[in-house]
Amino acid sequence: MTQRTTRRDFLKTSTALGAGYWVGGRTESVYSASPNEKLNIAIIGPGGKGASNLAGVAGENIVAFAEVDDVRGGPSMAKFPMAKRYKDFRKLLDKEEKNIDAVVVSTPDHIHVPAAVRAMRMGKHCYCEKPLSHSVSEARLAAETAKKYKVATQMGTQIHAGNNYRRVVEIVQSGLLGDVTEVHVWSGAGWGGVERSKETPAVPKTLDWDLWMGPAPTRPYHSDYVPFFWRRWWDFGSGTLGDMGCHYMDLPFWALGLRHPQTISAKGPKRHPESCPLGVTVDYQFGSRDKQPPVHLKWYDNVACPKELYGYKLPGSGVLFKGSKGMMLSTYSNYKLFPEKQFAGVELPPQTIPNSIGHHAEWLRGCKTGEPTTCNFDYSGALTESVLLGTVAYRVGKTLEWDPKTLKATNCPEADQFLRLPYRKGWELS
C-alpha cells in the first residue's frame, strides 16, 4: 500500500482502527484514534480570500504554500515560516505529494479546477473557493473526480454554515409557505462593464504573471486584473453572477432541492466579447422534484436588481421565496415572513438542521472521519453548473434547453464554446 493511501485511509478510519503508524518522507509519526489528529495541508493561493480560508484551517499542520504574488500572499506565508513555498501549484503537488493530506484552493476562478482536480487525482481532500469552476464542464469534472477518488470536499460558500440559512431552509421545507413555485435572487455587486486598457505596464517583480494566467489566454499584464478585478473579465472570471450567484442561489437550491434547470434565458446590456456585463437578469425553469412543483428562479444583479417585489421594499441583496401560502425574504443574517399580519405569532417549525461546527471545520472533520460535508462537490458542482449556465445563456443570447446528462444545450450548439473553455498549451487536464 502506498504512503499516500495509508495516511489518508488511516485518518478516515482512525476511530475504528484505534492507533497506528505512518512512515514516509518525514520522520515516523504516531497517530491516535482521535479524529482531532492534525492534517498536513497545502494552501494554493494564501493571499486575499485565501487568508481567511487559511485562518479557518490554521489549527492543522500548514506544510506548503503555492503563491504567484509574493506581496499578495506574503503576510499569510510569514505566519508559517516552516512551510515550504512554491510559485507553481503543480510543482507543489508533485514534490509534496507524499507529505500532504489536503489542499485549500483560493485562487481566481480560472485556476480552481486545474488545481483542485490535480490534487484530488492524487487522493488529496480539497476545499475550493466559489464558484467551483470557471466553466460548466469543469464543474462536472470536479464533482466526478471527487466521487471517483472518494475524497472529502467543500466549496467555499461559507454562509451555508450560518444559522439563518438553516432556519430558512427549515421553514421552507416545513410547508409553512405552501408550494413554492417562484424564487427571486439578487445581488447588488457589480463586476464588469469595462473596456480593456491599451496600456501595457511592466509586470511587478514580485509577480509571476505567466503562472497567474495559467490556462487562460495570454494577455499583457495590467492592474485591471490583479489582484482583484479579474472578476470583470471572461478570461478569468464570470462577472457578478459567477462571483455572487453561488452564495445567494445556494439558499433556494438547498431549501427546494434544486439541481439542474430545464431552460435558462438571460437578458442584459449589449454583449462584450471580453468583459462581463453589469445588470443581468436570468430566468431558470426547474422541473418538479418528488412532490414539489416546478420552480421559476430569477436572478438579478447590479443595476437590474429590483427595489421592491409584491409591494415590499427589498435590501441590496437577498432571496425572496413565493409560496401558495405566503412569502419569505432572506438575507445572510435574517428573514421575514409576509404578509406580516398573516404570520404574526405563527409557530415556527422545530429545529431539524443542527447548527454548523463551522464551514471549514465541517470539511476538516470530513477529511478525518469520512463524514459528509454540506457543500461537497456533488452538491456544489450542480449549483455552480446552474450559476454558470446563466452566463452562457447571456453570452449566446438564446434560451437554452438543457440536458444535464450530456452537458449540452440541445437547441443551441453554439453554446458549446462557453460550456467548455480551451486551456492554454501546457495547462491541459488530461
Image: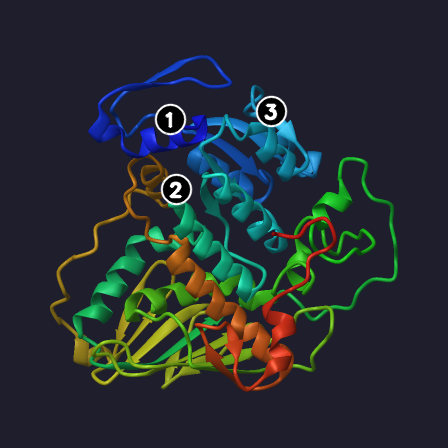
In the rendered structure, are the residues bearing label 2 and label 3 in contact, judged by CB atoms less than 8 Å apart? Answer: no
Q: CA distance from mark 1 to mark 2?
A: 14 Å
Residue 403 seen? yes
Which quadrant of the figure contains the N terminus? top left
Residue 179 position within the rendered picture, expressed as x and y whole percent measured from the top left: 23, 81
Give the numbered dot on residue 38: 1
Residue 127 position within the rendered picture, expressed as x and y whole percent measured from the top left: 46, 45
Residue 340 position within the rendered picture, expressed as x and y whole percent measured from the top left: 23, 77
Is residue 383 positioned above or below 181 on the image? above
Residue 76 seen? no
Q: Nearer the viewer, mark 1 or mark 2?
A: 1
Looking at marks 2 and 3 on the same chain, the residue that comes earlier in the sequence is marked by 3
- Closer to the camera in the image, 277 or 35: 35
Looking at marks 3 and 1 on the same chain, the residue that comes earlier in the sequence is marked by 1
Helix, strand or loop at label 2? It is helix
Q: Say which amino acid is labelled 1.
A: Lys
Residue 238: image quadrant is bottom right
Q: Residue at x 18, y 75 (%)?
A: 175
Residue carrying label 3: 84
Q: Say which amino acid is labelled 2.
A: His
The number of callouts visible is 3
Q: Residue at x 72, y 48 (%)?
A: 426
Q: Residue at x 60, y 33 (%)?
A: 94
Residue carrying label 2: 360
222 relative to 159 in the view: left or right: right
Q: CA distance from mark 3 to mark 1?
A: 18 Å
Q: CA distance from mark 2 to mark 3?
A: 22 Å
